[in-house]
Image (tube, grey):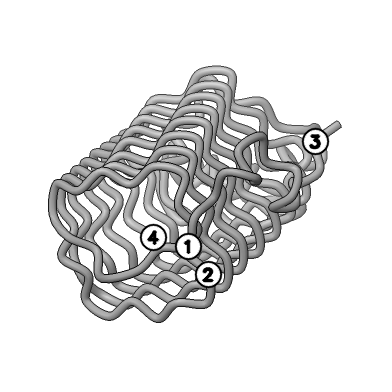
């Protein structure tokens, strides 16, 4: 049973949060800060560190947070568009009701990260490492896991549309509770994934095509 998303008051550091003021800068360290109702345009915060921080109703557009680190962060109703998040590291993070579009998250590391009720559109996760990551009741549209390593990743209640797994490595990936498996590429990389018998029937024509098998009834 997937865990329910937490509210801000449920965070163990909620009473210690201090409102963020100013602008994000490169290599800065942010500890127990609350980013609330902000509109951040083109942030230049490469290498920044965020520890026990909460983001609520924040819009982040463009900019660069390459190699930033997010440790024990909570993001609720965050709209994140077109930002460079490559080579970032995420640990014990929770993303709730977010809209993530056009993000460059390639070669990132995500461990114990939970997405709840999020929409991920055209997110580039090529070469990323995902371990103990869950996508619950999410929509993943045109998400690219090409060359990524996925370990103990689940998709309960989520719909996959045009998702790519080309040259990905999967281990203990559970797709059984996904509501739709729209896989645009990398069917031959699904070794290490678990699907239901009904999903296997849905995937059969694509699997046959990827293997060069012609299916023809007399």
- What residue does disc 4 label? 123
Q: Secondary structure at mark 2?
A: strand
CA gap, disc 2 and disc 4: 24 Å
- The kind of secondary structure element at disc 4 is loop
- For the residues bearing labels 1 and 2, Cβ distance under 8 angstroms: yes
> Which residue is at the front of the view, 218 or 209?
209
Mark 1 lies on a secondary structure that is strand
Please indicate whether residue 154 sits to the left or right of residue 31 in the image: right
Between disc 3 and disc 1, the foreground one is 1
- The answer to whether the residue labelled 3 contacts the one labelled 1, judged by CB atoms less than 8 Å apart, is no
Give the position of the N terminus as an image quadrant.
top right
Measured as percent of width and height from the top left, residue 9 is found at: 74, 49
Task: Please report the residue visible at 22 percent of the width from the left and 49 percent of the height from the top.
Answer: 86
**Discs 2/4, front:** 2
Secondary structure at badge 3 equals: loop
Locate residue 80, reporting x and y percent.
42, 70
**Residue bearing mark 2:** 36
Quarter assignment of residue 60: bottom left
Quarter-wise, where is residue 110 in the image?
Answer: top left
Q: Earlier in the sequence, mark 2 or mark 4?
A: 2
Which mark sits nearer the N-terminus, 4 or 3? Answer: 3
Percent position of residue 59, x then y: 44, 76
The residue indicated by pointer 3 is: 2
- Mark sitting earlier along the chain (4/1): 1
Q: Give the label on residue 78, or none.
A: none
Q: CA distance from mark 1 to mark 2?
A: 7 Å
């Amino acid at each position: 049973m997937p865990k329910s998303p937490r509210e801000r008051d449920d965070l163990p550091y909620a009473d210690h949060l201090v409102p963020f003021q100013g602008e994000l800068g490169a290599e800065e360290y942010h500890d127990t800060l609350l980013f609330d109702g902000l509109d951040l345009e083109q942030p230049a915060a490469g290498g920044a560190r965020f520890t026990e921080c909460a983001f609520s109703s924040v819009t982040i557009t463009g900019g660069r947070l390459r190699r930033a680190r997010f440790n024990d962060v909570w993001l609720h109703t965050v709209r994140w568009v077109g930002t460079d998040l490559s080579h970032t590291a995420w640990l014990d993070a929770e993303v709730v009701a977010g809209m993530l579009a056009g993000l460059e998250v390639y070669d990132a590391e995500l461990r114990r990260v939970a997405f709840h009720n999020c929409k991920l559109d055209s997110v580039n996760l090529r070469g990323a490492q995902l371990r103990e990551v869950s996508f619950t009741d999410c929509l993943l549209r045109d998400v690219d896991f090409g060359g990524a390593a996925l370990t103990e990743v689940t998709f309960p209640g989520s719909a996959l549309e045009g998702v790519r797994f080309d040259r990905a490595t999967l281990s203990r990936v559970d797709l059984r509770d996904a509501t739709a498996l729209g896989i645009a590429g990398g069917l031959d990389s699904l070794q290490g994934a678990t699907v239901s018998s009904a999903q296997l029937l849905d995937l059969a024509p694509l699997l046959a095509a990827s293997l060069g098998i012609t299916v023809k009834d007399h």
